Image (cartoon, rainbow, N blue to C red):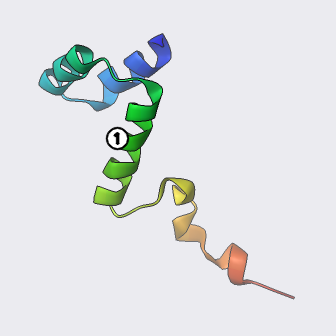
Amino acid sequence: GGDMDSFMELVLHEDDYEVYEDLDPDMDAIGRFAEAAARAGGEDLGKSGGSSRSGRSTRRR
């Protein structure tokens, strides 16, 4: 989809975006890429943004 192409154009370096266009990955491939990138960055996709506020899950009354 165009939305994903626009997003990838924003986050990828110009040369990398040309490779992305050549590969023309489907959504499954993009998902696997995003997971690999998140793992390389040391963060689970499910925890993006929330990891700094871990007190919510441990705080009980």
Give percent across and percent down for residue 21: 25, 15
The correct choice, above or below, for 52 with respect to 58 in the image is above
Give percent across and percent down for residue 12: 25, 30
The correct choice, above or below, for 30 with respect to 51 in the image is above
Q: Residue at 53% of width from left, 56% of height from top?
A: 49
Looking at this rendering, what residue extends furthest in the right direction?
Answer: 61
According to the image, label 1 marks what residue? 33
Looking at this rendering, what residue extends furthest in the bottom direction?
Answer: 61
Q: Residue at 38% of width from left, 17% of height from top?
A: 5
Task: For the C terminus, give its image quadrant.
Answer: bottom right
32 sits to left or right of 40:
right
Res 6 → quadrant: top left
The correct choice, above or below, for 42 with respect to 60 in the image is above
Give the mark count: 1
41 sits to left or right of 18:
right
Amino acid, disc 1:
Phe
Nearest the camera: 28 or 53? 28
Nearest the camera: 22 or 46? 22
Q: Secondary structure at mark 1?
A: helix
Classed neighbour count for the residue bearing mark 1: other residues with Cα under 10 Å, few (<14), some (14–19), many (≥20): few
Give percent across and percent down for residue 9: 31, 21
Q: Residue at 46% of width from left, 27% of height from top?
A: 27
Looking at this rendering, what residue extends furthest in the top direction?
Answer: 2
Q: Residue at 20% of width from left, 15% of height from top?
A: 22
The correct choice, above or below, for 21 with respect to 44 in the image is above
Res 8 → quadrant: top left
